[in-house]
Amino acid sequence: MKIKMKKLPLEKAMAIEPPARKKLGRPWFLFKLLIRLLSLPDLWATKFSYTSERMDKAKGPCLYLMNHSSFIDLKIASRLLFPKSYYIVSTTDGFVGKEWLMRRIGCIPTQKFVLDVALTRDMLRAVKEKKRSVLLFPEAGYTFDGCTTTLPKKLGMLLKKMDVPVVSIITDGAFLRQPLYNELRLRKTKTSAHMKCLLTREEIAEKSVEELDAIINEAFSFDNFRKQAESKTVIDSPDRAVGLQRLLYRCADCGAEGEMTTAGSKITCQKCGKSYELDIYGQLRAVEGETKFSHIPDWYRWQRECVRREIEAGEYRQDLDVDIVLLVDYKALYSVGGGRLVHDENGFVLTDENGKEIFTQSPLASYGLNSDYYWYELGDVICIGNKKRLFYCFPKQKDVVTKARLAAEETYKLLKTNARTAP
């Protein structure tokens, strides 16, 4: 997938006025039908199936909460929800170069991990005024390790405001079909989904925000690699480990960072030479010696613990050479040259090629970080910003965006915990 790009001096790009928020239009059935038809080949190829539970209780407009695993997610949603008319909460980058189309599909623009009060208003209008459902991906970003991405706190408050039934859509096989780390390679596997009315209006009214959050967290509790191993789902693509060093950037044996490389079905540390084979059931086995982590999410969690210890010791810092791309309006992305992105316990500081500060972001600005692999086939990216503009930073150093995401999440949690326990 490509995106429209334009080179522009930084000053000119910064001077562009963000587009005004537009009123919700009406989703066009013609485009819903087109998406449904275009989805058929992938759904057939993956022998898609689904199950449902309590759906007789989902009356009228609903809030659909779906996990986010790969590009097939929207195709699955189109199969499950067609021919209903519904809005889709979408990231602003999806509008670049195709705003007219996105609005007629029924997409509502928002920015990942940026406070957006206007989005809540639009969602309320959708269900109360337009009498249509809303599809929301509460994880915001694709899962890196096949497990639940951090969910926003107090999502239950949104549920109470919307006052409509809540339906969960949890997919199985979508992550295995096209994991983000594997550079958009398609694998041969089946996909399925379970659709459940989690909460009726009456159940939402009688429960506290904390109880609602607990119900959503339980619904969004999954581990794709573990399920693959337990169900003996075979992924025998010869290049199934390619790109895995993006996710597993720290050697589990010697602790070196940025030394992991992948080829075929193997991931290897170039410093100590330790090599692991990713088998057809998604489990790791050391080619020689001890297997430190056979389960990829366990390795990922260990990296999180390492990052947390660095933050607590005041040792975490990334100083990255980056290429900077701005998202300001929907006409194009604006490539504005190089710069430096520094990330530590004080948040992010972005400077231009001359060392002039462009943007800073507090560590408490968000509970998560918009980081991605192979974003629009341009490269791995770290995105910071606010409702006026987003700065997509493409590091020239390899395999650093995962650590940045982990560090942003852990710094936020530590600061919040310290604030609660302060006298």
Image (spheres, grey):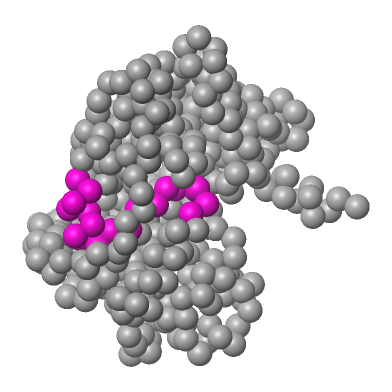
The answer to whether one can see residue 414 in this image is: yes
Relative to residue 157, is residue 187 depicted above or below?
A: above
Q: Residue at x 24, y 29 (%)?
A: 5
Left or right placement of residue 162 versus residue 172 in this view: right
Magenta residues (range): 98-116
Name of the residue lying farthest toward the top? 354
In the foreground, 179 or 271 = 179
Question: Does the segment drawn in magenta span residue 51?
Answer: no
In the foreground, 125 or 164 = 125
Relative to residue 55, is residue 117 depicted above or below?
A: above
Measured as percent of width and height from the top left, residue 16 is found at 36, 32
Q: Residue at x 23, y 57 (%)?
A: 103
Q: Residue at x 56, y 85 (%)?
A: 205
Q: Residue at x 22, y 48 (%)?
A: 99
Measured as percent of width and height from the top left, residue 93 is found at 32, 42
User: How many callouts does the rendering have?
Assistant: 0
Question: Does the segment drawn in magenta span residue 105?
Answer: yes
The answer to whether one can see residue 261 in this image is: no
Measured as percent of width and height from the top left, residue 168 is found at 40, 72
In the foreground, 363 or 46 = 363
Locate the N terminus by quadrant: top left
Measured as percent of width and height from the top left, residue 292 is found at 56, 37
Left or right placement of residue 387 versus residue 25 in this view: right
Kindly indicate the quadrant of the structure image that contains residue 317: top right
Left or right placement of residue 361 versus residue 159 in this view: right
